[in-house]
Image: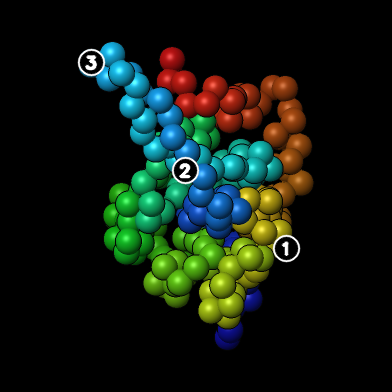
């Protein structure tokens, strides 16, 4: 029997996201920042910046409330991503990963989960090795056509514009707990929502 995307979603325990083009719109801003030098002169270093959707951040709170763990796997290495991951208290953060099945295998061994229990959200061909093997492969609306062709589900919104939230809500809806998680996210008595994405920009204090 062929499984539907909803059938696959009901099994998910961990959801992974690519970053550029999925949690962002794919634009990478690189700009110079002044750096004082030992001789008193001012040098520069290049700093990378990205824009993230607050809707996705709220979605990751919903995922936690629904019993899932959340992670990112990206080929680039960026302090901006590290800061956002700290704000969201992500369980799994893998940067500099050209071959994304390696961290997937590490997490499977660490968490005792199977591929059927992992969802992955991607947008480009570097994501296909994971998408071809994981339980639920999700492509964002702005993904390359080759990626959409192999996805079980395509988000209605583009990367950086709520696609991550779409993916999470699709899974929670399939599990039958979306409304429950939404209500829990605005419940003053629930300790989880206030502890996540508090907007300190990565301040660890």
| Residue 30: mark in rendering | 2
Instruction: Give the alpha-carbon distance from disc 2 to disc 1, as whole Å.
Output: 29 Å
Residues 15 and 163: in front is 163
Residue found at x 59% / y 25%: 198
Q: Nearer the viewer, mark 1 or mark 3?
A: 3
Residue found at x 59% / y 68%: 143
Q: Are marks 2 and 3 in contact (CB under 8 Å)?
A: no
Q: Are marks 2 and 1 in contact (CB under 8 Å)?
A: no
Quarter of the image where one finds residue 45: top left
Residue found at x 33% / y 27%: 43
Task: Decide which of tag 2 and tag 1 comes sooner along the chain.
Answer: 2
Quarter of the image where one finds residue 60: top right
Task: Decide which of tag 2 and tag 3 comes sooner along the chain.
Answer: 2
Residue labelled with disc 1: 156
Q: Residues within 10 Å of mark 1 (few under 14, many from 20)?
A: some
Q: Is residue 21 visible?
A: yes
Q: Secondary structure at mark 2?
A: strand
Q: Are marks 1 and 3 in contact (CB under 8 Å)?
A: no
Residue 163: image x %, image y %? Answer: 65, 55
Residues 105 and 101: in front is 101
Q: Is residue 180 left or right of residue 27?
A: right
């Amino acid at each position: 029997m062929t499984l539907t995307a909803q059938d696959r979603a009901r099994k998910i325990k961990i959801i992974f996201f690519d970053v550029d083009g999925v949690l962002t719109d794919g634009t990478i801003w690189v700009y110079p920042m002044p750096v004082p030098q030992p001789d008193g002169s001012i040098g520069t270093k290049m700093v990378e910046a990205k824009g993230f959707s607050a809707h996705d951040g709220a979605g990751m709170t919903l995922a936690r409330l629904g019993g899932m763990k959340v992670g990112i796997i990206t080929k680039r290495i960026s302090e901006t991503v590290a800061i956002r991951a700290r704000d969201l208290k992500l369980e799994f953060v893998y940067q500099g990963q050209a071959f994304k099945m390696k961290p997937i295998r590490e997490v499977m061994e660490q968490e005792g989960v199977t591929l059927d229990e992992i969802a992955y959200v991607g947008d480009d061909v570097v994501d296909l090795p994971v998408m071809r093997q994981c339980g639920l492969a999700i492509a964002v609306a702005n993904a390359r056509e080759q990626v959409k062709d192999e996805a079980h589900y395509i988000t209605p919104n583009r990367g950086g514009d709520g696609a991550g939230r779409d993916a999470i809500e699709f899974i929670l809806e399939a599990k039958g707990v979306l409304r429950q998680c939404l209500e829990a996210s605005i419940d003053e008595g629930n300790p989880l929502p206030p502890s996540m994405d508090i907007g300190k920009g990565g301040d660890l204090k």
